[in-house]
Image: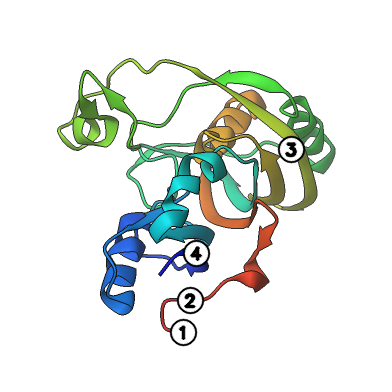
Amino acid sequence: MDGIINIYKEQGFTSFDVVAKLRGILKQKKIGHTGTLYPMAEGVLIVCLGKATKLVDLLAKDDKCYKTTMRLGITTDTEDISGKILSEHEVSEHINEQRIKSVLAEYVKTYDQIPPMYSAIKKDGKKLYEYAREGFLVERTPRSVTIFSITDISVKLPDVTFTVHCSKGTYIRSLCRDIGETLGCGATMTALIREEVHGVKLEDCYRLSE
């Protein structure tokens, strides 16, 4: 089979899990996905089959849109709510909706982002999350990412929900971390949905059960 299947990746699965399950469902070995979603995240995962796997690298370069929620006042080692809490701070009165929206607007730009320790980026031939699981904190090389827009902002303290249109390679967990640092109270991501890739939206996708 040659072609593309748009999958709604559900929580609890890695992108690799999705590919492995599709190999069993479709009885086909040559399958590749176009952009990793880690287990906590859900949403659009474009999967290429057969000859279409030649498109994987091309499609992986596309911009992406995410809907995310971050919780202010908490930081964790994974930069999301599943991790070990590193610090807790009270969200002070001056961190109001106006201040939050102002800081979010500051991040609509190209900037050098430090990726999270719990990620699959390699350093000296070893994945960062492998160092993290062994208890090591290693220096990470900042990567240039672009935030094209932050919209649909909803503030219900301590939670803030917004939609991000960003470049390939952007870690939304790390964006939430950076926003929390700018606000001075810290932040960790509590939810992440990839809503669109290459014009493919959530309503265009099939769950594995389908």
Q: For the point 65% across and 51% down, which residue is it?
A: 198
Q: Which mark is residue 210?
A: 1
Question: What amino acid does circle 3 point to?
Answer: Glu
Left or right: residue 162 compared with residue 91 = right
Q: Which mark is residue 207?
A: 2
- Seen from the viewer's position, the closer of residues 134 and 204 is 204
Give the mark nearest the N terminus, 4 or 2.
Answer: 4
Three-letter amino acid code at disc 1?
A: Glu
Spatial CA distance of label 3 from label 4 is 53 Å
Q: Residues within 10 Å of mark 3 (few under 14, many from 20)?
A: few
Q: Is residue 88 above or below residue 38?
A: above
Q: Amino acid at mark 2?
A: Arg
Q: Nearer the viewer, residue 36 or 91?
A: 36
Assess disc 4: are there few (<14), some (14-19) or many (≥20) residues with their C-alpha within 10 Å of its C-alpha. few
Check the image and tell me how it is coloured: rainbow
Does residue 112 lie above or below 105 as drawn? Answer: above
- Distance, label 4 to label 2, CA atoms, is 17 Å
Q: Are marks 4 and 2 in contact (CB under 8 Å)?
A: no
The residue located at (55%, 54%) in the rendering is: 192
Secondary element under disc 4, as helix, strand or loop, is strand
